[in-house]
Image: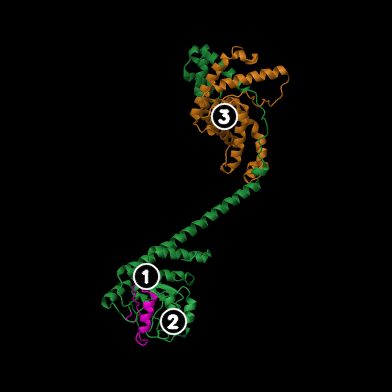
Amino acid sequence: MALIQQARQGRIEAFNTLVLAHQARVYNLAYRLLGEPDPAADATQETFIAAYNNLHQFHEGSFVAWLMRIATNACYDELRRRQRRPTLSLDQPDTEIQWISPAESPENAAQRAELSRAIQACLDALPIDQRTAAVLCDVQGHDYQEIATITGASLGTVKSRISRARERLRACLRSAEELLPDAYRLNQKKP
Amino acid sequence: MSLRMFGLLPTDADLLSAYLDNALPASERAALERRLTADPNLRTALDELQRTLVILRAAPQLAPPRDFTLDPARYGRSRRASRTNARVWLRWSAAIAAIALIALVGVIVRGINNSRQSTSSGAIAIVPTGMLLTSSTTPLTISTNSLAAKRTESPTLPGVIPSTVMSPTLVQKLAASPALPVAPAVSTFRALPATQNTQPNVLQATVAPLIDAQSTSAQATKAPPTQAPLAAAAAPPDGQSAAAQSAGAQPFAPATMSSAATPPAARLYAATLSATANTADSANNNAVAIDSPLQALWSLIRRLLNLLGSGLPSG
């Protein structure tokens, strides 16, 4: 809270400390909602710029939830832009994905990449409101109340979206279980 | 495999989801646990849903491709402060501009209203503040209504010269004439309401037709000085020279001089306009000749511009 207060007074160094503390969470949310690393990076940058410019509007509550709300809106804006101006793939490789924790071995790195791609493919198939609810709840670990705050939806709506998203994801992952690492296949016993 | 394949209802998905999140009330939780014990399909659905959540929570976390910190040079305090200062200056400038605009509009509207009052009263009174017309400070008044009446009653008043139509040349000639003392040049005029034209001894200069300088001069020289000394002279463009020429003029008594010809109404108005133009030439002397709202507005704008030192060309 002290950093927020200092940042509100115009201390950019204090705000940048907050950026470094939360940029991974914001970037991962943006990546899971948008599905591509470069647009996710753009949305992340927009999120922190908007947060800095509107810091005076944050008074109380969870700073993380407030930041996630800005990030969610930035991602929605990007998705709306895509709908208005669909872009063709120019076969330009996106930024290479780096993981937070380095893989112990190349095999583990490959399995992690496969798991991430399978999850992302199933998330991309969801409606955006269910995708947001599922990512916030099951990927990022927010509780229902925080998700309601972030998305601006009611608690009941949040529960319903999460439930439907999970059911779709379960069906999707089961159909694509050959893409999953052995430890995560649904037809197996619990790992 | 969907829930229907497990023989479950859509509402069961909500119950299982909330159960896994430990978000069910105690009674619903107990009821669901009883069903889970009795229904293997429901239990299988719960297991798959639980494994789905395990997969999702195991989603690898991506490392940000770069730091998203903000550039202090662009977003730092100094820039924010300068932007704030710029906003403050902008607000103050806008406020001052708005006040100035309102004041300008007010002045213009007031000037138009004044001119309307003057024109609606049917008379224009011009008071030379920088001269003494007679022994008293009776203002020289030009009343268009009274002029018309006077024109019909006494179409020819010997010795009356329409002061408002006298050209500078004429004034100089009159001043040079020993028989016709010319009043000191008018340096400034101020408009008076026509209602002030109530004194019987007010010298009323009848606006005569546009007469040429020669005929006026001839009539002026013919007029006996004792009967018709020149009572008023319009302000020439160069008031100082006229004043110098009339410095030696003798005191004079009120009298009138007029053209012998009776002017038509159109020429009467033209004479007034001519006088207005002559008076407006001496804008630096704060001369105001209100003859129409447009002229009043123009005179007002010129005065404002003079105050601002714009140096608007006269004419």
Q: Quadrant of residue A77?
A: top right
Give how far across and how far down residue A130 sits, in percent.
52, 25
Q: Is residue A29 magenta?
A: no
The answer for how far apart the CA atoms under marks 3 and 1 are is 89 Å
Of tags 3 and 2, the one toward the viewer is: 2
Q: Do the residues indicated by labels 3 and 2 lie within the same chain of the protein?
A: no
The answer for how far apart the CA atoms under marks 3 and 2 are is 104 Å
> Which residue in the protein does label 2 denote?
B175
> Which residue in the protein does label 3 denote?
A143
Q: Give the mark, 2 or 1, whose residue is nearer the N terminus.
A: 2
Circle number at residue B272: 1
Q: Do the residues indicated by labels 3 and 1 lie within the same chain of the protein?
A: no
The answer for how far apart the CA atoms under marks 2 and 1 are is 22 Å
Of tags 3 and 1, the one toward the viewer is: 1
- Density class for disc 1 (Cα within 10 Å; few <14, some 14-19, many ≥20) is many
Give how far across and how far down residue B145 sits, in percent.
30, 72
Residue flagged by tag 3: what amino acid is it? Asp
Q: Is residue A140 visible?
A: no
Magenta residues span: B199-228
Residue flagged by tag 2: what amino acid is it? Ala
A37 or B271: nearer the eye?
B271
Residue flagged by tag 1: what amino acid is it? Thr
Colour orange maps to chain = A
Q: Quadrant of residue B229?
A: bottom left
Q: Residue at x 43, y 61 (%)?
A: B106
